[in-house]
Image (tube, grey):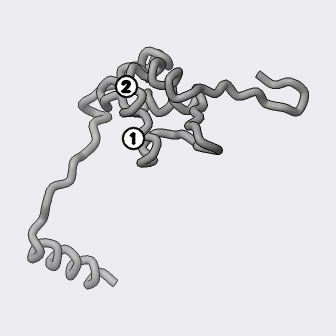
Amino acid sequence: MVLGEVTVVETMSIHEAAKFLHLNHETLRRLAQSGKIPAAKPGKKWVFIKADLADWLRSQYSQSRRTLLSEEITGDKVCHSINAEKRGGLISPRQAETELGALLKLQ
């Protein structure tokens, strides 16, 4: 919500944030302390911004679930076989050297 020039941000205590995320407050404290979850400690207590927690929670969804959610939101029809990411594999040092040599010879 914007009031004139001031943007109001909804903040939460560690106990409110833990309830929102369905986590134990000690687990949440450790995640915040390690920087794995967005939080600030301006004094003696942790402060969480609700919108940041919601974004963090969405980022924890599996890739397949995120794809399904984006389809539901946008209404796009996605062909998973065409849009699939190509996974790279390990190559041997000799194969890498051969490919690099071929690329360098082109110039």
| Position of the C terminus by quadrant | bottom left
Q: Is residue 10 above or below residue 97?
A: above
Residue 2 in the figure: left or right of residue 44:
right
Local packing at callout 1 (Cα closer than 10 Å; few below 14, some 14-19, many 20+) is few
Residue type at the position of mark 1 = Arg
Local packing at callout 2 (Cα closer than 10 Å; few below 14, some 14-19, many 20+) is few
Q: Which mark is residue 30?
A: 1
Q: Residue at x 43, y 15 (%)?
A: 72
Farthest residue to the right: give it.
4
In this orientation, which residue lies closer to the viewer: 58 or 96?
58
Q: Residue at x 12, y 65 (%)?
A: 91
Residue 7 in the figure: left or right of residue 90:
right
Element carrying mark 1: helix
Q: Is residue 54 above or below residue 86?
A: above
In this orientation, which residue lies closer to the viewer: 97 or 25?
25
Residue 18 in the figure: left or right of residue 84:
right
Element carrying mark 2: loop
Number of marks drawn:
2
Q: Position of residue 34 (x, y in %)?
A: 41, 48
Residue 1 sits in quarter:
top right
Residue with the mark numbered 2 = 24
Q: Is residue 83 above or below residue 88?
A: above
Q: CA distance from mark 2 to mark 1?
A: 10 Å
Residue type at the position of mark 2 = Asn
Residue 43 sits in quarter:
top right
Q: Position of residue 77 (x, y in %)?
A: 39, 19
Q: Residue at x 37, y 25 (%)?
A: 24
Residue 7 in the figure: left or right of residue 83:
right
Q: Are circles 2 and 1 on residues that touch, CB within 8 Å?
A: no
Q: Position of residue 52 (x, y in %)?
A: 56, 33
